[in-house]
Amino acid sequence: MRGIEQLKKNHIDFSVISVLTEQALSYPDELYHFFISNGIYRVGFNVEEIEGNHQVSSLNTQEADDKYFGFMERLYSLTSQPGNQLKVREFDRLRRAICNPTKQATQATPLSILSFDYAGNFMTFSPELLSLDSVDYGKFILGNIRSESFNTIADNPKFQRINHDIQSGVHRCRQQCEYFSLCGGGAPANKYFENGSFNSTETMYCRYTQKILTDILLTDIEKQIGIREAA
Ligand code: SF4
């Protein structure tokens, strides 16, 4: 909060990332008013993910899914009121995706995202993979920019194996999931750490960041269309 005061005092624009646990889902109104009353007008919500050493999430239950739906539905309603000042990253992202359906998720597309650590190690796909390791591939790092060029990445056997597994998962998503045109096959890191394989489909993460939010937004859009048609 002291940091926010400094940013405001110096007229530096900022946004906030708020991590949701199961406990937070009972308080959509309180959170909304907290942001507004503290001059926070742009927020992104990260859910408590299962990744790396964090192997358990308070959100991974049917009860939490239902609460999350209620939380986001209420937040969507609050941010749809005339005069609302709060922008929610997830709603904006999804509105853009509805207008421009995707072919494939950025996180699952080689070299769409490049991540580096302080030592020059690099990785592509989900950024968090850079600092994680696994039983199947060892460290996910694909090379070091001080000694290797990206041009060699396609010949790297580890890259080829990871890419093959990720693309197999995307292919299964494309065939099986009705949300594919908005999601594009999801986040490889979440698939790996939740399902034990890149070559998999649904995760808790995609339910929260894609499926549940899509249901809320599309229900509202259909309601608006119904109101207009009736008028
Ligand atoms: S929503 Fe989940 S299951 Fe559907 S395409 Fe995305 S990652 Fe795959």
Image: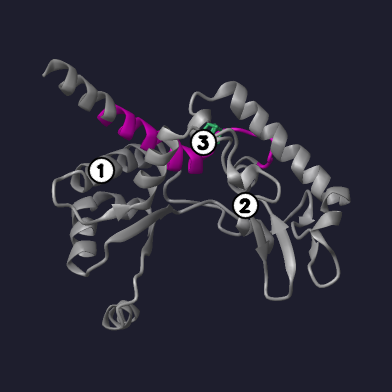
Mark 1: which secondary structure? helix
Nearest to N terminus: mark 3 or mark 2: 2
Nearest to N terminus: mark 2 or mark 1: 1
Query: Is residue 200 inside the magenta stretch?
Result: yes
Nearest to N terminus: mark 1 or mark 3: 1
On residue 183, the disc is 3
- Which of the 4 quarters of the picture holds residue 45? bottom left
Q: Nearer the viewer, residue 164 or 112?
A: 112
Question: What segment carries the magenta color?
Answer: 196-220
Mark 3: which secondary structure? helix
Across and down, in percent, residue 62 comes to 39, 36
Residue beneath label 1, please?
A: 76
> Magenta span: helix, strand or loop, mainly?
helix
Q: How far apart are marks 2 and 1 (CA)?
A: 27 Å
On residue 126, the disc is 2
Visible in this render: residue 214? yes
Across and down, in percent, residue 137 comes to 79, 51
Q: Is residue 81 left or right of residue 196?
A: left
Mark 2: which secondary structure? loop
Three-letter amino acid code at disc 3? Cys
